[in-house]
Image (cartoon, rainbow, N blue to C red):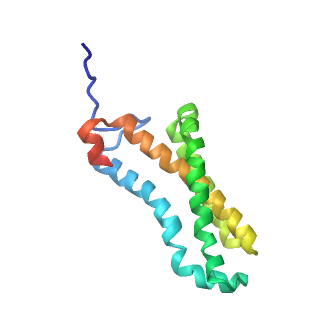
Amino acid sequence: MTAETPVSDAPAMRGAPIGFVEFVALVAALMSLTALGIDSMLPALPAIGESLGIASENSRQYIVTAFVIGFGVAQLVHGPLADRFGRRTVLLWSLGLYALANVACALAGSFTLLLIARVAGGAVIAAARVATIALVRDCYHGRAMARVM
């Protein structure tokens, strides 16, 4: 016979806990960064192609593909990192590195450098997504977890 331990409505955090609504807003903002990393580039592809001298429209699509490849592959690495170093640490590092990757994208002087920066951006934002999902799973169970997600 096992008994389930109740899970509080607020996530266990250092300092002042945040409420359910604030936690859901934070999760939504963190989860939306992946979509923002892809969707913000789509209308800019023609201008980026013109700026970097990419004549082929098909080649411009590598900008999105590079991000998705980095994002997909890196998720396998970030789960164990979040378990080892903590959700908060991995989340904060990933947000900082994501900002740096986006600065590198903005300053890229060639198509190759842009693609490398996009792979790096996708790889580091994958850590934020993995850590966010793990944090939700750590703090909520059952129906409460479903409400957050």
Residue 113, located in which quarter of the rendered image? bottom right
The N terminus: image quadrant: top left
- Name the residue: 42% across, 40% down: 135
Q: Residue furthest top?
A: 1
Residue 42 in the image: x percent, y percent? 52, 76
From this viewpoint, is residue 94 visible? yes
Q: In this view, does 5 lie above or below 26?
A: above
On the picture, is 35 further left or further right than 107?
left
From this viewpoint, is residue 95 visible? no
Residue 55 in the image: x percent, y percent? 69, 86
On the picture, is 77 further left or further right than 116?
left
Residue 97, located in which quarter of the rendered image? bottom right
How many numbered marks, from 0 up?
Answer: 0
Residue 93 in the image: x percent, y percent? 59, 47
Residue 72 in the image: x percent, y percent? 56, 53
Q: Is residue 140 above or below residue 112?
A: above
Q: Is residue 126 above or below residue 143?
A: below
- Name the residue: 56% across, 80% down: 44
The one nearer the camera, 90 or 59, is 59
- Name the residue: 49% across, 45% down: 130
